[in-house]
Image (cartoon, grey):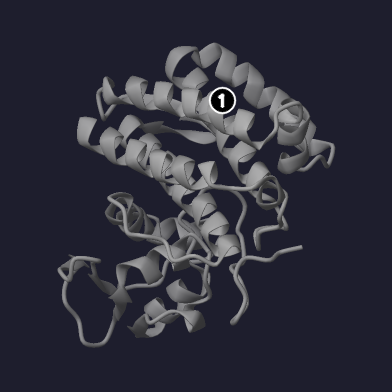
Amino acid sequence: MKDLAADLLAEYRALSNLCEELTPEQWRAKTDFYGWTPWDEIAHLLYFDETALQSVHDAARFEADTRALSGELATGQEMSAIARRRYGHLDGPALLATWRQRHEALVQALAGIDPKARLSWYGPTMSARSFATARLMETWAHGQDIWDMLGRERPPGPGLRHITHLGVTTYGWTFGNRKLPVPQPMPFLELQAPDGSNWTWGEPSAQHYVRGPALDFALLVTQRRNRADTLLQWAGDSADQWTRMAQCFAGEPADGPAPGARVTRE
């Protein structure tokens, strides 16, 4: 758990360091994710890192706040508007400082938890290991929106392996969440890591597979890229279905970007 927590902290700090460089204008610039600004992206992460701390330290408070949030969402309020109302008094640098304090505290708390301990979240409880991996994935995905907005190439980080593994373990979730039968066999996955090594899952197959760069697979399963805009290759019906709708995050079924786009969904 300590190793995973260290990788989570590295992802948090990489994004924090990037946001330190933002100008006031860049804090207000629109990303391709629903037109959110970097301020919105960090406010979103801050909101859920704060509720993650509640889950770790005060499950009753977490459940109460979850009911309140569900009520707000049921009235048609957008998550971005809810976060703006909570943190709107903070400018970009102040928001960043608050987020740093919260995520550092969260990492410290998670590092000392049994990885199999169950934590409350939005939906079924999660193991502490899965909980930390989910926070890492969300931080990475929303960070990608900011890297894309800036037009800069993102350096590889230790979180990539965790995200690709999460993408594999949510194969069944992608279809079950859409009330679709899970296609079989699950494709063999062979990904090229940034260091040139190969990461594999499943039994090798020449008929059912997904192959390509690990980064492209992570962009696919977090729905930051359409499969047509990656170097991924696939074969077999199950692989074709998976790469069309892969979703490694919780929530309602979501559609990824169209070919040539990123994640504009307005």
The amino acid marked with disc number 1 is Thr
Compared to residue 185, the image places residue 77 above or below, namely above
* Depth check, front residue: 120 or 12: 12
The residue at 32%/59% (across/down) is 156
The residue at 55%/12% (across/down) is 60
Asked whether, in this view, residue 199 is left or right of residue 41, the answer is: left
Q: Position of residue 4 (x, y in %)?
A: 26, 38
- Can residue 186 be seen in this snapshot? no
Q: Position of residue 33 (x, y in %)?
A: 65, 58
Image quarter of the C terminus? bottom right
Q: Position of residue 243 (x, y in %)?
A: 45, 74
* Depth check, front residue: 57 or 70: 57
- Can residue 226 be seen in this snapshot? yes
The residue at 48%/59% (across/down) is 222
The secondary structure type at the circle numbered 1 is helix
Q: Position of residue 78 (x, y in %)?
A: 77, 43
The residue that disc 1 covers is 98
The part of the image, by quadrant, that contains residue 148 is: bottom right
Compared to residue 72, the image places residue 139 above or below, namely below
Compared to residue 80, the image places residue 171 above or below, namely below
How many C-alpha atoms fall within 10 Å of the one at disc 1: few (<14), some, or many (≥20)? some
Figure label count: 1
User: Looking at this rendering, what residue extends furthest in the right direction?
Assistant: 75
Image quarter of the N terminus? top left
